[in-house]
């Protein structure tokens, strides 16, 4: 198979998965990370994926905007910018160091597993350590900003947080949609500044932007499929799928190192 056909095929799968995760089962979006990294490398894939994510976010907001729980969004809001700033600082540092290996994915995978364990054990741990406690909210907000900035990997963290809050699936989808639309739009100037600061280690290029434009129909198709599935999933199955995918995603982030 020619290299170009292989690239387009792998990209099509990733783009369709972006749309599917935004309107169907959010946890599936983490599977896009290794696919895009295989196409563009770890650093460049961060910026290459962002336009596809924003398109998916816009579609999700259009479908679920009336179900958003703004009280949940407000509790995380003060801490997300801190995570974005920390993530930007780390991206700058890694760009200056020009490391070949990706040190971030395994770390994020471990953090997701810790959050998942806290969620599953919340009946025994009391309320201070669970994801939706006051302390958990601070950590979740900062981690969401940090992980989405460095590798677009905040999906499992938000899934665990919102699932632990007991939101029904439509409210979870609406809250997730607005969360990531705002987060991903906030990342645009950071990526532009980091690329301008270190053009030899860019986070996006004209080639990645052309690729994103080609993938728009696949994001739309994936979003349609995700919406069709989400309507048919019972609440308990939806919740179980979120937590299971968060665990699988964490393992993938660790083993791809």
Image: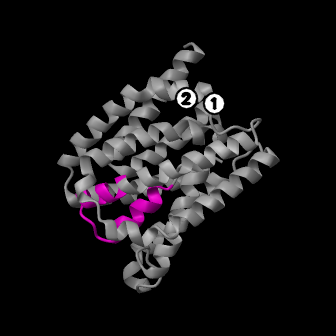
Return the residue nearer the eye: 4 or 83: 83
Query: Does 62 lie within the magenta span?
Result: no
Residue that sits furthest to the right in the current view:
97
Q: Is residue 204 left or right of residue 114?
A: right
Q: Residue 147 lies in what quarter of the image?
A: bottom right
Look at the numbered discs 1 and 2 and tell me whether their residues touch, using CB distance below 8 Å. Answer: yes
Local secondary structure at mark 1: loop
In the image, which disc is placed on residue 209?
2
Q: CA distance from mark 1 to mark 2?
A: 6 Å
Considering the whole magenta stretch, tell me its main secondary structure.
helix
Residue 158 placement (x, y as % from top left): 43, 61
Q: Is residue 97 left or right of residue 30?
A: right
Return the residue nearer the eye: 220 or 111: 220
Determine crowd level at label 2: few under 14, some 14-19, many 20+ residues with C-alpha closer than 10 A: some
Location of residue 88 with respect to 81 vertically, above or below:
above
Query: Does 171 lie within the magenta span?
Result: yes
Local secondary structure at mark 2: helix
In the image, which disc is placed on residue 90?
none
Q: Residue at x 56, y 16 (%)?
A: 4
Q: Is residue 85 visible?
A: yes
Residue 11 placement (x, y as % from top left): 49, 28
Residue at image mark 1: 205
Q: Is residue 134 left or right of residue 223?
A: right
Determine crowd level at label 1: few under 14, some 14-19, many 20+ residues with C-alpha closer than 10 A: some
Q: Residue 242 lies in what quarter of the image?
A: bottom left
Q: Magenta span covers which residues?
A: 154-177
Return the residue nearer the eye: 15 or 65: 65
Residue 119 placement (x, y as % from top left): 41, 72
Q: Is residue 199 left or right of residue 226?
A: right
Residue 121 placement (x, y as % from top left): 42, 77
Q: Residue at x 59, y 30 (%)?
A: 39
């Amino acid at each position: 198979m020619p290299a170009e056909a292989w690239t387009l095929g792998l990209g099509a799968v990733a783009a369709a998965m972006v749309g599917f995760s935004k309107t169907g089962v959010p946890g599936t979006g983490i599977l896009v990370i290794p696919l895009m990294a295989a196409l563009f490398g770890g650093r460049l894939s961060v910026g290459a994926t962002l336009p596809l994510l924003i398109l998916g976010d816009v579609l999700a907001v259009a479908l679920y905007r009336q179900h958003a729980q703004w009280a949940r969004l407000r509790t995380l809001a003060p801490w997300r910018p801190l995570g974005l700033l920390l993530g930007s600082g780390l991206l700058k540092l890694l760009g200056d160091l020009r490391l070949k290996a990706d040190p971030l994915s395994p770390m994020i995978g471990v953090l997701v597993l810790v959050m998942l364990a806290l969620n599953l054990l919340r009946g025994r741990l009391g309320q201070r350590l669970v994801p939706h406690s006051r302390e958990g909210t601070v950590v979740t907000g900062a981690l969401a900003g940090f992980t989405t900035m460095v590798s677009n990997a905040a999906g499992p963290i938000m899934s665990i947080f919102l699932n632990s809050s007991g939101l029904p699936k439509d409210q979870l989808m609406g809250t997730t949609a607005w969360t990531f639309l705002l987060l991903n739009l906030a990342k645009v100037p950071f990526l532009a500044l980091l690329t301008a600061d270190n053009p030899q280690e860019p986070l996006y290029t004209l080639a990645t932007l052309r690729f994103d434009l080609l993938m728009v129909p696949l994001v739309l198709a994936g979003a349609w499929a995700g919406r069709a599935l989400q309507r048919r999933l019972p609440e308990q199955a939806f919740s179980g799928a979120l937590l299971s995918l968060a665990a699988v995603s964490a393992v993938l982030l660790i083993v791809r190192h």
